[in-house]
Amino acid sequence: MEGLSLTVVGLGIIIVGAGYGISRIGQAAMEAMSRQPEISSKIQTAMIVVAALIEGAALFAIVVAWLKG
């Protein structure tokens, strides 16, 4: 039972970390777009790519934590 509770805590940390990382990307992208609106499409594309990479890494970490638990 203790292994399961540690797995749940680990999964929670992974999810919170991924959410925080994506929110920081969004914040930085909005600030950059407000400073240079002419390149907002390039910034948005880069933001989406990086957010997808973070989600992929988080999903991989969730699967590993789940299998270890």
Image: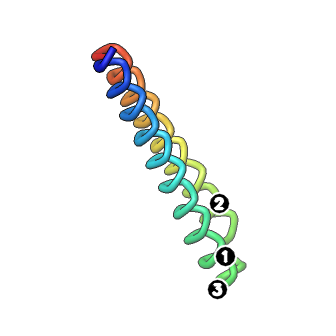
Q: Position of residue 54 (x, y in %)?
A: 46, 44
Which residue sits at x=50%, y=39%?
A: 55
Apparent side of residue 13 relative to residue 42 in the rendered image (left or right): left
Question: Circle 3: is it few (<14), some (14-19), or many (20+) Cα within 10 Å?
Answer: few
Q: Is residue 26 above or below residue 48?
A: below
At x 61% / y 62%, what residue is drawn?
Answer: 26
Whole-percent x, y for residue 15 in the image: 49, 40
The residue pinned by badge 2 equals 44
Q: Amino acid at mark 2?
A: Gln
Q: What is the x, y in percent for residue 10?
A: 36, 34
Give the Cα separation between the discs numbered 2 and 1: 8 Å
Residue ID for mark 3 = 35
Residues at badges 2 and 1 in contact (C-beta under 8 Å)? yes
- Three-letter code for the amino acid on which mark 3 is drawn: Arg
Mark 1 highlights which residue?
33
| Residue drawn at 42 percent across, 27 percent down | 8
Residue in the foreground of this view, choosing between 26 and 34: 26
Q: Is residue 23 left or right of residue 59?
A: right
